[in-house]
């Protein structure tokens, strides 16, 4: 595993810049779009959102294409110039400085498999083939040493400008031997550079190791998460997580539940009460997690196979967070709390998972690494269920369900076992879990007999404004009662 040490602590916000600023994707209008006051929206607009992503707890931003291109950014015309629809090199430098001032890392999207048809000197650097039938995307000739020199020069140039990482677009279409010659030359100048390849299928570990990349995209797990939830088939998810464990032995995959190429998660799922479960999975399994911009607000969008079919999944963001639709903020708060949990448990980066309970609509798994462990319980059913959690007696339980901020909210009061309310400070003094202290301390769960009749377990009166939702734990501490469409994180 060769990735830089800093990657262990990184959680990414993935943005498609041309869409974010509302640029004309057709390329007919080459100037930046304008905001409500008529001011140009360049990539500096992202600076106004850095506090927003830092508030979520994210500390890295992965940018889609920013180089001068003909239309959507993946038909590059000049690797050394900023697309005029996004501004200038000064705008880019301002963004880099603002990110680094907040401790935010930056990744650029390197489209090195193909270029736009009007790319200068393309006849000497390209082949006669096009990328996946797209006539405007001419494939580079990776057997030509001049192409390797070009890619090295581009990667080093922008690393010199302050970026921290590269995403290699369509890396699966390039012979890994090409990357194996390019990346060492780049790392001679920038040894802490992080490199992630876009790989859709095939043998992920072999591709990573043969190419010298640090990681690749985990599409297999992405599919299993949304498909398993949509079909209420936790067996599919469990199979994929076993495969994921094998990958973690050789490298740490780039994990995600959405990106610029796929239908939004909130549009894929037919029941929005299962959306929190996907985010719980993303933030509790091994990997380097990335959140696609807007997914933290439950954005919808369907990818269509037509010209302009990506527009809906690559939308413009407003000028400020206050202008976002109100329905997305509960998911934002959930994301915020789960990211906090992830940041507090950096060992999750390489954690492997083991199934402890499995049915079509119930799944409990334990994640372990470096002597630490957590157990996560998912309930996809419309009724509360008791789910066994074999192992040590549970000492801390956080539970969420649909309609809440997934178990977390901003209210400071915590109901104790006797039903009295305590303030956040009193809760901290007693060792309970409160806002910002998720799973750092033990909490006393409600205890019920093992033979409890679930029809008498009423969780409907849980105050959804409470900071902590406690689920019932059976008297020997080896099972939890999880509410309908709920989840629990246990220690």
Image (cartoon, rainbow, N blue to C red):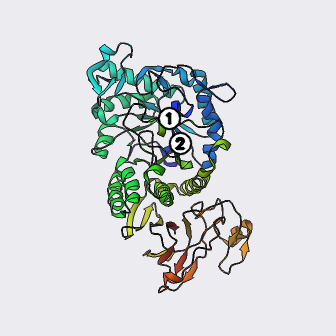
SS of the residue under disc 1: loop
With respect to residue 195, does 425 lie above or below?
Answer: below
Q: In this view, does 71 lie to the left or right of 319?
A: left
Q: List the residue tagged with mark 2.
A: 293
Kindly indicate whether the residue at mark 2 contacts the one at mark 1 (C-beta within 8 angstroms). yes
Using residue 149 as the reference point, say whether residue 52 is left or right of it: right
Examine the rendered structure and indicate whether residue 271 appears above or below residue 31. Answer: below
Horizontal side of 173 relative to 338 (left or right) equals left
The residue located at (54%, 26%) in the rendering is 161
CA neighbours of label 2 inside 10 A, class few (<14), some (14 to 19), many (20+): many
Residue 112: x and y in percent read 37, 27
Which callout, 1 or 2, points at the residue further toward the start of the chain?
1
For the residue carrying disc 1, how many other residues have a C-alpha within 10 Å: few (<14), some (14-19), or many (20+)?
A: many
Q: Which of 57 and 326 is in front in this view?
A: 326
Which residue position holds label 1?
Answer: 16
Q: Which mark is residue 168?
A: none
């Amino acid at each position: 595993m060769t990735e830089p040490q800093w990657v262990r602590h990184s959680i990414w916000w993935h943005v498609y810049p041309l869409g974010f600023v509302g640029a004309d994707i057709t390329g007919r209008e080459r100037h930046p779009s304008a905001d409500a006051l008529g001011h140009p929206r360049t990539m500096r607009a992202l600076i106004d959102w850095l506090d927003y992503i830092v508030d979520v707890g994210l500390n890295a931003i992965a940018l889609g294409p920013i180089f001068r291109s003909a239309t959507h950014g993946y038909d590059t015309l000049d690797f050394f110039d900023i697309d005029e629809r996004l501004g200038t090199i000064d705008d880019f430098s301002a963004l880099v400085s603002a990110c680094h001032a907040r401790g935010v890392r930056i990744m650029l999207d390197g489209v090195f498999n193909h270029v736009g048809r009007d790319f200068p000197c393309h006849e000497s650097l390209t082949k006669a083939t096009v990328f996946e039938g797209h006539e405007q995307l001419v494939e580079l000739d990776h057997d030509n040493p001049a192409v390797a020199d070009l890619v090295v020069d581009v990667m080093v140039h922008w690393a010199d400008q302050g970026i921290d990482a590269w995403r290699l677009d369509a890396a699966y279409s390039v012979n890994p031997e090409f990357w194996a010659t390019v990346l060492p030359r780049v790392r001679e100048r920038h040894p802490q550079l992080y490199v992630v390849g876009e790989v859709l299928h095939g043998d992920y570990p072999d591709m990573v190791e043969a190419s010298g990349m640090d990681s690749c995209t985990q599409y297999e797990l992405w599919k299993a998460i949304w498909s398993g939830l949509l079909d209420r088939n936790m067996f599919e998810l469990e199979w994929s997580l076993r495969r994921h464990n094998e990958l973690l032995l050789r490298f740490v995959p780039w994990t995600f539940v959405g990106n610029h190429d796929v239908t939004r998660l909130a549009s894929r799922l037919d029941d929005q009460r299962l959306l929190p479960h996907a985010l719980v999975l993303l933030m509790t399994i091994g990997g380097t997690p990335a959140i696609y911009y807007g997914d933290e607000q439950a954005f919808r969008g369907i990818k269509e196979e037509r010209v302009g079919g990506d527009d809906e999944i690559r939308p413009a963001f407003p000028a400020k967070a206050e202008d976002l639709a109100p329905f997305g903020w509960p998911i934002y708060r959930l994301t915020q709390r789960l990211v906090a949990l992830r940041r507090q448990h950096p060992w999750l980066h390489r954690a492997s998972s083991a199934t402890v309970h499995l049915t079509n609509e119930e799944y409990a798994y334990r994640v372990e690494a470096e002597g630490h462990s957590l157990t996560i319980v998912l309930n996809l059913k419309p009724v509360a269920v008791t789910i066994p959690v074999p192992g040590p007696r549970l000492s801390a339980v956080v539970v969420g369900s649909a309609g809440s901020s997934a178990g977390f909210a901003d209210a400071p009061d915590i109901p104790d076992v006797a039903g009295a309310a305590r303030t956040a400070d009193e809760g901290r003094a007693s060792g309970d879990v409160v806002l910002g202290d998720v799973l750092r301390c033990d909490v006393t769960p409600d205890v019920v007999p093992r033979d409890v009749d679930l029809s008498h377990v009423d969780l409907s009166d849980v105050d959804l404004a409470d900071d902590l939702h406690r689920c019932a734990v059976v008297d020997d501490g080896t099972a939890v009662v999880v509410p309908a469409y709920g989840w629990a994180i246990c220690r």
